[in-house]
Amino acid sequence: AHPNMRLSIVLLVLASLWQGSNSQGCGSDRLDLAFILDSSGSVNEDDAGNWGRMLDFVVSVASTFTIGSDDTRIGVVIFGDEGNLELYLDSIYDANTLYDRIRSIGFLNQATNTADGLQKTREIVYRDGYGKRSDAADVVILITDGIPTIRVDDTINEANLLKDFAEIVVVGITNNVDINLLRSIASDPNAVVLIDDFNGLTANLDNVLSGICPSAPAPPGPECLDCPEMFN
């Protein structure tokens, strides 16, 4: 499929996610959904609970979908000095077991090798034979609170290689992120969501999903990336 058509399909799926986030979610949407999580030292630098808040957010997003071998599959990579695989797409199909496993992921407290997180996702999570399906939409959600410090010049190239077959949405937390870089990583500028701090993750899940899916009805608050308050 043409990249723009694939992105439109993904945004429509995520739009339905937002509309159903307080009811029945996405039903039986067939996604191979991977999370790439920044586990660098800055995440917990100001508040030791921030890593847990990020994991709770991942669970909140995942729980909006129907989890199962024939529905949505979840993979997770975290990155510090390098990318670490936590969950293959076919690791866990039981929702509650999956949520417990996600919440148990340890904090690395290292540097920021975003490129390796992207690379490990492409080479391992979406590798044939490890749970990737040819008839499922490949969607990646990258969550970060800063800028790369290792393999800096490889970051955009690794994102582009992943975008050859997957759609990437990016959640940037705090004003320490590089907005232009996040836009270059994402499949589309409208697939970038900025949040002031980690407390705004799960508490503002609807705002996050509305920012990812501009076609969805927006809840009160910022409606798009072009809103000036999201860049302050």
Image (cartoon, rainbow, N blue to C red):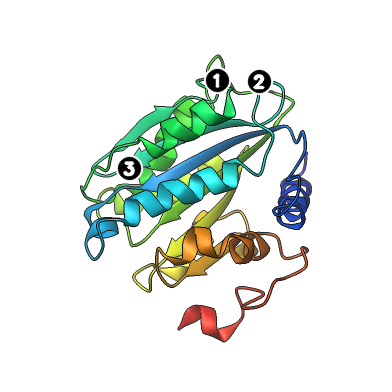
Q: Which numbered dot is residue 69? A: 2
Q: Which residue is the site of mark 3?
A: 79
Circle 2: element type: loop
- Name the residue type under label 3: Phe
Q: Which mark is residue 141?
A: none
Label 1, on which residue? 90
Number of other residues with Cα within 10 Å of mark 3, as a class: few under 14, some 14 to 19, many 20 or more: many
Real-space Cα separation, disc 2 to disc 3, in angstroms? 26 Å
User: Front-most of 31 and 198?
Assistant: 198
Q: Nearer the viewer, residue 27 or 87?
A: 27
Sequence order check: which comes first, mark 2 or mark 3?
2
Provide the secondary structure element on which disc 1 rests.
Answer: loop
Distance between mark 1 and mark 3 Cα atoms: 20 Å
Say which quarter of the image contains residue 26: top right
List x then y, in percent, for residue 212. 64, 60
Question: How many residues crowd around disc 1 within 10 Å: few (fewer than 14), some, or many (20 or more)?
Answer: some
From this viewpoint, is residue 182 visible?
no
Disc 1 and disc 2: Cα gap in Å?
A: 7 Å
**Residue 213 placed where, x, y %?**
70, 60
Residue 84 in view in this figure? yes
Residue located farthest toward the top when viewing the structure as drawn: 129
